[in-house]
Image (spheres, rainbow, N blue to C red):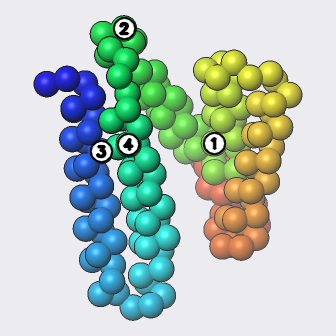
Amino acid sequence: MTASRERAIVTMGISLLVAAAAVSSLWLGPAARRMPLVVALPTLGLLLVEWIRGRRDVASSAERRPLEPVIVGWLAGLVTLTVVLGVLAGPPLVLAGYLRFRSHERWRVALGMAAVFAALVFVVFHVILDIPSGGLGGWPR
């Protein structure tokens, strides 16, 4: 089985799971169904884009280096820093590192995007939702 075929099968499998979650949320109350639908509908749209993009991908998979170890490493760093430093500091630091070292952006761009992301996280989690940042040290209230 080719890599593009495997990718399409995985994408369609995840699409079915997300669609099942969206449909099952329709039996919930109005307030409870909002969050699953807010997550599921854009996810289905992105999965459709991924499926279309995968269908157009004609490059040989033998020519590309496998990205899975790299992605797993970045995700492990994201989880570790989020647990240790909290939601407000961990993800923006990983974003800055990813933009600088993986995407080769300038430091000014990487740190600027991380600062904007940190402000967005602060507003959403602390101002709007009133959820503490977490981390091993906790978030002072």
Query: According to the image, label 1 marks what residue?
Result: 91
Screen quadrant of the C terminus? bottom right
Residue 75 percent across, percent down from the top left: 48, 34
Q: Is residue 4 visible?
A: yes
Q: Is residue 80 visible?
A: no
Judged from the image, the secondary structure of the residue bearing numbered disc 3 is helix
Residue 127 percent across, percent down from the top left: 76, 70
Instruction: Of the two numbered discs 1 and 4 on the same chain, state the one appearing first in sequence.
Output: 4
Residue 77 percent across, percent down from the top left: 53, 31
Q: Give the farthest residue toward the right.
A: 108
Instruction: Of the two numbered discs 1 and 2 on the same chain, state the one appearing first in sequence.
Output: 2
Instruction: Of the two numbered discs 2 and 3 on the same chain, state the one appearing first in sequence.
Output: 3
Query: According to the image, label 2 marks what residue?
Result: 63
Q: Is residue 14 left or right of residue 99?
A: left
Kind of residue indicated by mark 4: Ile
Q: Nearer the viewer, residue 14 or 52?
A: 52
Q: Mark 4 or mark 2: which is in front?
A: 4
Instruction: Of the two numbered discs 4 and 2 on the same chain, state the one appearing first in sequence.
Output: 4
Q: Mark 1 or mark 3: which is in front?
A: 3
Other-residue count near label 4 (Cα within 10 Å), few / some / many at <14 / 14–19 / ≥20: few
Other-residue count near label 1 (Cα within 10 Å), few / some / many at <14 / 14–19 / ≥20: many
Residue in view at x 74 percent, y 56 percent: 120
Query: According to the image, label 4 marks what residue?
Result: 52
